[in-house]
Amino acid sequence: MMTVATFTLSDEQRAILALWFELNASLSSYHKLIHNYDSAQLAWQAGVESWRQLGIHHSHLTRHEHPEKTRASIDTIQQALIEEKYGLLFADQPNYPAQLLEIYDPPPLLFYRGNSELLRWAQIAIVGSRKPTAHAQKITFDMAQYLAQAGYVITSGLAIGVDKRAHLGALAQTDVACQGRTVGVMGTGIDVNYPNHHDRLFSQIIEQGGCIISELLPHTLPHKHTFPRRNRLVAGLSLATIVTEATIKSGSLITARLTSEQGKQVFAIPSHIDNSNAEGCHHLIREGATLVYHPQQVLDDISVQLPSQSKQHQLDHNSKAQSLDKSVFKQSATIKKTIKPQEVKPAPSITVPEHLTTLFEKLDWHGQDLDALILVTELVPAQLIGQLMELELLGAVTVQGGRYLRI
């Protein structure tokens, strides 16, 4: 169900929207005008020449010369609010997420769809590669599911890959009371679904009680500059950021950097050293990010960051989560959810018989299909399938999406 508070825009709110429209959502120009005129109304009422003297960009000046277009845009937004197509929060309202007011450049407004109350809950960001390995997809899903069941909201950027798995993991709750604990931050206007094939994900988040937000005006299309803006909000909303898998050039490292600059903790999940998809995580760990291999480690570290008024509430959730069914975070790599971090023991070693050693050494953690394994092992199909079955029975190999990979 979509929860939207409809209201008639005040004169000051209309002026904020007017500036946001004419400045094309430029944060620097907006804050410059507010600083010089003290209010959005006075800033919008100022003439073009006054704006020019402040060094406002000429494209913004051109829009300021045509206030009738601005008013028409605001009227369209007001009508959309009445029709409950989306909601709108202003920075001076009590239900605006307070944690965003603490970042360097908070947005003056947020458009949203879904349950905006989640924005004030304790949040943990999970981000990573758009093309994660099968192993990283599983880790991301399981970790998001565990943390959501512990009472936290999982925040991510609605991209393909890790972001999507994080949202879906948070939504995969058997307990109705735990459903919908995810916030998606858009790099487009609130009414522009991107990527296009994520329509179902957007709907699922809203229908299950989650929330989707954007600081950008409706109809804003994706652009390379809008996604770093989104990343700062993902970091700003959250108590900490977890990077489950990322290349060295991944945008997730921007989110991690912003998280660190905001004085918050960055967690990174390690992988094997020849996984190029995880170079970003290894770089973060080398630069000081906290290495984690179990979600409870994240909970233990961030519990001290919770505001005092919500700490007991969150601890109650954590206690409940630890007493719930232990199937949420299934064994993955060398970890088990059924024991606390301080009790984690290495997974039992597996002895691979000599006749399977050649095949086992050709397997990796990315996963390979049968055709690829036939090429690298030079085994005939029947012999290869038989050996793979033996390795599966030994617990040394798993199959995901038709690809065989080490455990």
Image (spheres, rainbow, N blue to C red):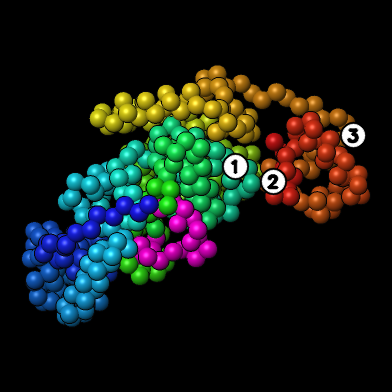
> Which amino acid type is shown beneath numbered disc 3?
His
- Residue 305: image x %, image y %? 32, 31
State yes or no: residue 365 in magenta.
no
Report the Cα–Cα distance between label 2 and label 3: 24 Å
> Which amino acid type is shown beneath numbered disc 1?
Lys
Residue tagged 1: 138
Asked if the residue at tag 2 contacts the one at tag 1, i.e. Cβ–Cβ closer than 8 Å, the answer is: yes
State yes or no: residue 194 in magenta.
yes
Q: Is residue 281 left or right of residue 45?
A: right
Q: Is residue 135 left or right of residue 3?
A: right
Residue sitting at 23 percent across and 47 percent down?
95
The crowd level at tag 2 (other Cα within 10 Å; few <14, some 14-19, many 20+) is: few
Report the Cα–Cα distance between label 1 and label 2: 10 Å
Residue tagged 2: 400
Report the Cα–Cα distance between label 3 and label 1: 30 Å
Residue sitting at 35 percent across and 54 percent down?
2
Residue tagged 3: 355
Asked if the residue at tag 1 contacts the one at tag 3, i.e. Cβ–Cβ closer than 8 Å, the answer is: no
Of callouts 3 and 1, the N-terminal one = 1
Q: Could you say whether the residue bearing mark 2 is in a helix, strand or loop?
A: strand
Tell which of 61 and 92 is nearer to you.
Answer: 92
Residue 86 visible in this rendered orientation of the protein: yes
Q: Could you say whether the residue bearing mark 3 is in a helix, strand or loop?
A: helix
